[in-house]
Image: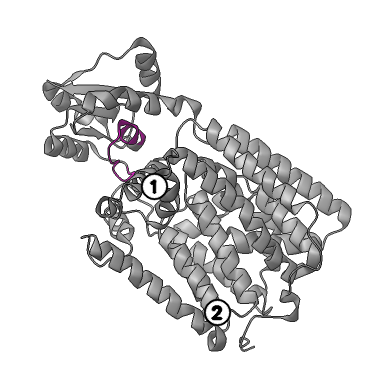
């Protein structure tokens, strides 16, 4: 069957009545994500790079902020809050929590088009129950605002507003490269109408490249791709078949119940579901060409939760209530017990202890990005360094301090420990810091 000229059906109208408790659910989700953020010991390793970029944007240092391998969209969202005096972690927790809460409204509209009010109610509850989403907001990842844009883009597609679809996809691309797949999925499903979503995406990509070029970094919108291509610490990178075979476990870890419920709704011949299926397929394909991590699958959380809500709405009411209760309980338990280990707080404490000791711009080298950020310096992109790479970094920078993982199998501290000790002496830390650092396998050295 040939694809339709537009995926907009009569059912795409907004819900006829407010979904039960939606503002209450949104407030609860925002409060939960924010509470997890304030409880989290430290941001993620990617997160501290975003926070450093946000600080540089807030200070007007666009050249530094655009000079990292990470996309600039999320730090740009945080920068105004930082400029107003909010700490970057607090800004990230607020933005992440509010973005997750705001996503419930367009998600409800999308799911309602698939299965009515019951689907809308189920979809927003399943989204709130996804185990990883509040934790990503808490750990300063970029997914929450990315998903908000993807949800609004999907709703714009329901209404045939293709320029708006393209604008949402372009804005999402500035946050995560997968944003462009939003417009691509609709253009593949209904090329005669949805092609109009593609030009705004192209403009957005070119604008990002132009911004980096104007800041002195070359006409490249996504330096992170080149960075990943040179990484030798991801042996599974690009092994598409093996990665596809490894997908089910991380998929279920990412979505839990929603990841199962969406599967019966993946119907190619359904004009509403076809672009959602394509979104999921394209996102999974991107993950398979890189490396499989549960977090990466969350880029397709909007179609997954909308389809899962439609499937749940088709079940008897008793089943719906039971499955939703189980999903919410699992999400709450996972959010509270998962996340970054509490003893990672030593990376914050160690960085803050070192901060006055490297005042005046003395360099510090570390394979722990969080320590570097808490010191007040630019963290390296998170990756596992070999012993030779660590030795080269130290030799090139001649830093005042070196902070290393002593138990990392990849960095093989034993491979350069003797070389390091010839040039750097172990630092005697305060008792509490020393005990925590030893427990985590972290050592601090000062230049002799």
Q: Nearer the viewer, residue 178 or 354?
A: 354
Q: Quadrant of the C terminus?
A: top left
Does residue 378 belong to the magenta stretch?
yes
The extreme top residue here reads: 431
Residue 423: quadrant of the picture? top left
Place of residue 92 in the rendered image (x, y in percent of width and height, measured from the top left): 48, 44
- Which residue occupies the extreme front position in the image? 84
Residue that mark 1 sits on: 50
Q: Which residues are magenta?
A: 370-383
Q: Is residue 57 above or below residue 107?
A: above
Q: Real-space Cα distance between discs 2 and 1?
A: 31 Å
Q: Where 337 falls versus 383 (above or below)?
A: above
Going 80% across and 54% down the picture, which residue do you hit?
A: 20
Query: How far from the left and from the top, in percent, is residue 286?
Result: 45, 63
Quadrant of the drawing holding the N terminus: bottom right
Q: Residue at x 36, y 18 (%)?
A: 438
Residue 419 seen from this side: yes
Residue 181 in view in this figure:
no
Disc sitting over residue 393 in the figure: none
Q: Position of residue 223 (x, y in %)?
A: 30, 59
Judge from the rendering whether residue 197 lies leftward or rightward of residue 385; answer left or right.
right
Q: Secondary structure at mark 2?
A: helix
Magenta highlight on residue 210: no
Front in this rendered view, residue 425 or 241: 425
Could you tell which of marks 2 and 1 lies nearer the N-terminus?
Answer: 1
Q: Secondary structure at mark 1?
A: helix
The residue singled out by tag 2 in the image is 162
Residue 200 vertical placement versus 108 (above, below)? below
Q: Nearer the viewer, residue 164 or 444?
A: 164
Mark 1: few/some/many CA within 10 Å (<14, 14-19, 20+): many
Q: Position of residue 251 (x, y in %)?
A: 57, 53
Few, some or many residues within 10 Å of mark 2 (<14, 14–19, 20+): many
């Amino acid at each position: 069957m040939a694809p339709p000229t537009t995926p907009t059906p009569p059912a795409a109208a907004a819900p006829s009545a407010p979904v039960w408790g939606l503002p209450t659910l949104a407030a609860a989700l925002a409060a939960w994500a924010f509470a997890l953020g304030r409880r989290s010991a430290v941001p993620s390793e990617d997160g501290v790079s975003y926070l450093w970029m946000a600080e540089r944007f807030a200070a007007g240092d666009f050249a530094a902020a655009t000079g990292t391998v990470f996309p600039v969209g999320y730090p740009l969202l945080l920068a105004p809050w930082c400029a107003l005096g909010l700490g970057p972690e607090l800004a990230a927790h607020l933005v992440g929590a509010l973005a997750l809460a705001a996503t419930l409204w367009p998600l409800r509209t999308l799911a309602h088009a698939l299965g009515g009010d019951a689907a809308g109610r189920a979809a927003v509850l399943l989204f709130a129950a996804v185990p990883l989403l509040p934790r990503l907001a808490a750990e300063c990842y970029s997914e929450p605002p990315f998903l908000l844009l993807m949800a609004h883009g999907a709703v714009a597609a329901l209404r045939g507003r293709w320029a708006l679809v393209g604008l949402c996809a372009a804005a999402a691309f500035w946050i995560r490269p997968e944003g462009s797949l939003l417009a691509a999925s609709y253009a593949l499903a209904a090329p005669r109408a949805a092609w109009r979503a593609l030009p705004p995406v192209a403009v957005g990509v070119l604008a990002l490249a132009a911004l980096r070029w104007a800041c002195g970094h070359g006409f490249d919108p996504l330096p992170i791709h080149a960075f990943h291509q040179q990484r030798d610490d991801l042996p599974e990178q690009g092994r598409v078949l093996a990665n596809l075979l490894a997908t089910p476990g991380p998929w279920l870890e990412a979505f839990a119940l929603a990841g199962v419920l969406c599967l019966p709704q993946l119907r190619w011949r359904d004009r509403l579901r076809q672009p959602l299926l394509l979104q999921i397929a394209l996102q999974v394909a991107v993950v398979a060409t890189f490396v499989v991590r549960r977090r990466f699958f969350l880029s397709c959380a909007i179609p997954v939760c909308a389809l899962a809500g439609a499937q749940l709405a088709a079940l008897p009411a008793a089943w719906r209530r039971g499955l939703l209760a189980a999903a919410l309980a699992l999400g709450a338990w996972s959010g509270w017990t998962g996340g970054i280990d509490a003893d990672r707080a030593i990376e914050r404490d160690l960085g803050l202890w070192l901060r006055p000791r490297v005042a005046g711009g003395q360099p510090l080298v570390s394979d722990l990005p969080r320590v570097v950020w808490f010191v007040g310096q630019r963290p390296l992109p998170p990756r596992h360094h070999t012993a030779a790479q660590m030795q080269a970094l130290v030799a090139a920078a001649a830093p005042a301090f070196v902070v290393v993982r002593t138990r990392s199998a990849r960095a093989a501290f034993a491979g350069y420990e003797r070389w390091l000790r010839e040039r750097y002496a172990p630092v005697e830390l305060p008792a509490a810091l020393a005990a925590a650092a030893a427990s985590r396998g972290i050592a601090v050295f000062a230049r002799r």
